[in-house]
Image (spheres, rainbow, N blue to C red):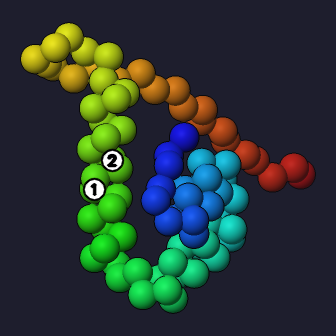
Amino acid sequence: MRQAARPDLAVGWSALSEARWEDAQAAFSAALARDETPEALAASFAREFGDLARTANVGPPGGPAEYTYEYLLVVARRGR
């Protein structure tokens, strides 16, 4: 799970990881209201994404990078 230096950002990232969209939006909005500029948030995201890419890489040293991931496709249909 993502760890952020600022409490609102940590709450926001946690909410995103748990698909709590409204909570994430509220937390990120609070960070922006506290003078966190979009540029600063983008720079933070870039740093944290780079850290994640380095730590999650299961490829051999020197490349190529390999990442394990899972996904679930859900198709919903309305009942008739």
Disc 2 element: helix
Name which residue lies at 35% across and 50% down: 48
Name which residue lies at 22% across and 23% down: 65
User: Residue 16, labelled with which disc?
Assistant: none
Question: Of the residues shown, which amino acid type is indicated by label 2?
Answer: Phe
The image quadrant of residue 66 is top left
**Few, some or many residues within 10 Å of mark 2 (<14, 14–19, 20+):** few
Disc 1 element: helix
Q: Which residue is mark 1?
A: 46
Name which residue lies at 34% across and 79% down: 38
Q: Is residue 60 above or below residue 27?
A: above
The image quadrant of residue 46 is bottom left
**Residue farthest left in this picture:** 62
Q: Is residue 19 above or below residue 33?
A: above
Question: Of the residues shown, which amino acid type is indicated by label 1?
Answer: Ala
**Residue farthest right in this picture:** 80
Count of numbered circles on the image: 2
Q: Nearer the viewer, residue 40 or 69?
A: 40
Residue 18 seen in the current view: yes
Residue 12 seen in the current view: no
Q: Position of residue 31 (x, y in %)?
A: 51, 78
Q: Nearer the viewer, residue 64 or 47?
A: 47
Is 53 on the left-hand or right-hand side of 34? Answer: left
Is 77 on the left-hand or right-hand side of 57? Answer: right
Name which residue lies at 30% across and 36% down: 53
Q: Which residue is mark 2?
A: 49
Q: Is residue 47 above or below residue 23?
A: above
Q: Position of residue 43 (x, y in %)?
A: 27, 65
Labelled pair 1, 2 in contact (Cβ < 8 Å): yes
Q: Position of residue 77 (x, y in %)?
A: 75, 47
